[in-house]
Image: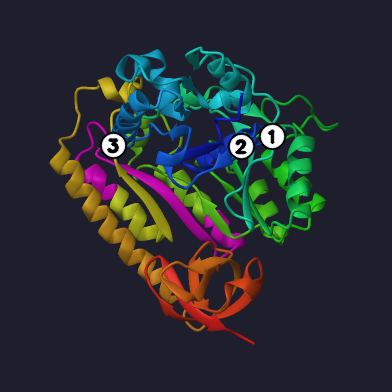
């Protein structure tokens, strides 16, 4: 059946969870006998793994799909699949827009891709968006890197932020067991990986749905407990994690990150707004004072920790003064990096229906002003690295300068320096920083 279906191509939009999902789906396809093709036009199966956080990501998917749908008219054997969050959100509606699609599947169905494709190959058009219990991850992902790897520890999200479509499309929280996570990490270590990033939509919620308490009555499967276990089982050199929620980030977790040497001093904790009224409307469940206190606690343990975050401007009803409160928070904390976005109304979320939507010009003006400040603060942070020696995990060659390699500091700053990728790939190298830019550094090997 597979003899004439040789090549596949996956296009991934959106977050790290999607990238991890794409790697797992690629692993399934290769087990089924498909081979990767760099060129989508040469592939017999094209899969778009989609993101619905912003409207323009959604529009992009439809324009890519339109092009391939035309190709399918000439080549009826071409298989077209849409996975991810747009697939979950739109379901059968996508088929009305693009009837040429063979498979529409939500994120919870990633591990069932093989079974779903078998149905497609029997001539069925398949839509898989119903909520299911996520089957344990026994697939071998086709990892895009040989040095760093994603490891999903919890799927879904139980939060109900008023602007966010993720709980609708990724389902309720489902934690993997510590045993399954640890065995995946041991396997990665055997395969020579040097760094892992533990992933979850709301990673600090890990374990809440797993049974079990200690003799003292404390729940024994918290994210902090998992970090101690993961640290113990492997010789992986670096451990990262994302994404955290300020409401669940405890001092016990901070202390674990301080005590465990493999955990990198980089924390990604979205704050979304610096104004309490907006935070309340967003249903985030904390105040800007609580967020500041959290950052202060992290810095009391690790003064030089890198803090990155996400922020939204132009949320419905946001006044200029409320936006100024966001600028003030960014000014005071001095983030190393900030993912910024203008509010985009998402279907099925409460905020999309509110009357006080901000016009596009105001949103774009605020986004520009925020990005300008973010660049200034990041540049100041980068200057602190000058003259210092940083440990860099070498990942790949600099695509713009083939006599340079690139990798990241423990605090996740991208760093370039002269060297040969063949001898340095996967090595931890001490580099003296000689040049700083807002979001990257340049240095030279330090003996």
Q: Earlier in the sequence, mark 1 or mark 2?
A: 2
Left or right, residue 173 beside residue 277:
right
Task: Verify CB contact (< 8 Å) between mark 2 and mark 3.
Answer: no
Q: Report the residue that reaches farthest toward the bottom.
A: 447
Q: Is 310 inside the magenta-drawn segment?
A: yes
Q: Secondary structure at mark 2?
A: helix
Residue at coordinates 57% horizontally, 79% vertically from top-left? 431
Q: Position of residue 181 (x, y in %)?
A: 73, 39
Gap between marks 2 and 3 measured at Cα: 25 Å
Q: Report the residue that reaches farthest toward the right.
A: 215
Q: Position of residue 271 (x, y in %)?
A: 42, 44
Q: Position of residue 37 (x, y in %)?
A: 50, 44
Q: Earlier in the sequence, mark 2 or mark 3?
A: 2
Task: Please give the label number shown on residue 139.
Answer: 1
Q: Secondary structure at mark 3?
A: helix
* 76 relative to 421, above or below: above
Task: Verify CB contact (< 8 Å) between mark 1 and mark 2.
Answer: yes
Left or right, residue 32 beside residue 13:
right
Left or right, residue 150 beside residue 443:
right
In this rendered view, identify the residue nearer to me: 364 or 95: 95
In this rendered view, identify the residue nearer to me: 378 or 320: 378
Q: Position of residue 190 (x, y in %)?
A: 79, 53
Quadrant assignment for the C terminus? bottom right
| Crowd class of label 1 (few under 14; some 14 to 19; many from 20; radius 10 Å) | some
Q: Nearer the viewer, mark 2 or mark 3?
A: 2
In this rendered view, identify the residue nearer to me: 236 or 203: 236
Q: Which residue is mark 2?
A: 24
Q: Which residue is mark 3?
A: 56
């Amino acid at each position: 059946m597979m003899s004439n279906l040789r090549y596949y191509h996956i296009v991934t939009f959106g977050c790290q969870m999607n990238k991890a999902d794409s790697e797992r789906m690629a692993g399934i396809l290769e087990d089924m006998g498909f081979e990767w093709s760099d060129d989508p036009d040469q592939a017999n199966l094209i899969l778009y793994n989609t993101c619905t956080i912003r409207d323009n990501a959604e529009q992009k998917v439809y324009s890519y799909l339109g092009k391939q749908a035309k190709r399918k008219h000439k080549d009826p054997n071409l298989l077209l699949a849409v996975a991810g969050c747009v697939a979950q959100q739109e379901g059968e509606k996508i088929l009305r827009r693009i009837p040429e699609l063979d498979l529409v599947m939500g994120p919870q169905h990633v591990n069932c891709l093989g079974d779903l494709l078998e149905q497609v190959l029997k001539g069925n058009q398949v839509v898989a968006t119903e909520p299911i219990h996520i089957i344990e991850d026994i697939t071998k992902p086709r990892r895009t890197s040989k040095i760093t790897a994603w490891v999903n520890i919890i799927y879904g999200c139980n939060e109900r932020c008023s602007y966010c479509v993720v709980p609708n499309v990724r389902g309720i929280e489902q934690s993997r067991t510590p045993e399954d996570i640890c065995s995946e990490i041991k396997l990665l270590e055997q395969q020579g990986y040097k760094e892992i990033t533990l992933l979850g939509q709301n990673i600090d919620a890990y374990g809440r749905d797993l049974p079990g308490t200690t003799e003292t009555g404390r729940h024994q499967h918290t994210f902090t407990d998992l970090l101690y276990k993961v640290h113990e089982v492997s010789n992986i050199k670096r451990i990262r994690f994302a994404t955290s929620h300020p409401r669940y980030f405890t001092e016990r977790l901070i202390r674990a990150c301080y005590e465990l040497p493999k955990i990198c001093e980089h924390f990604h904790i979205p704050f979304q707004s610096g104004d309490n009224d907006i935070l309340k409307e967003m249903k985030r469940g904390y105040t800007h004072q609580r967020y500041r206190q959290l950052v202060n606690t992290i810095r009391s343990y690790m003064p030089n920790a890198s803090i990155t975050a996400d922020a939204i401007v132009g949320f419905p009803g946001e006044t200029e003064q409320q936006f100024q409160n966001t600028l003030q928070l960014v000014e005071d904390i001095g983030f190393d990096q900030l993912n910024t976005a203008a509010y985009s109304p998402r279907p099925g979320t409460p905020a999309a229906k509110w009357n006080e939507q901000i016009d596009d010009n105001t949103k774009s003006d605020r986004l520009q002003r925020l990005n300008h400040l973010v660049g200034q603060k990041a540049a100041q942070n980068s200057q602190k690295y000058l003259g210092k020696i940083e440990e860099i995990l070498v990942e790949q060659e600099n695509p713009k300068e083939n006599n340079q390699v690139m990798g990241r500091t423990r605090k996740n700053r991208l760093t370039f320096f002269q060297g040969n990728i063949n001898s340095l790939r996967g090595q931890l190298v001490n580099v003296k920083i000689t040049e700083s830019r807002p979001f990257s550094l340049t240095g030279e090997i330090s003996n």
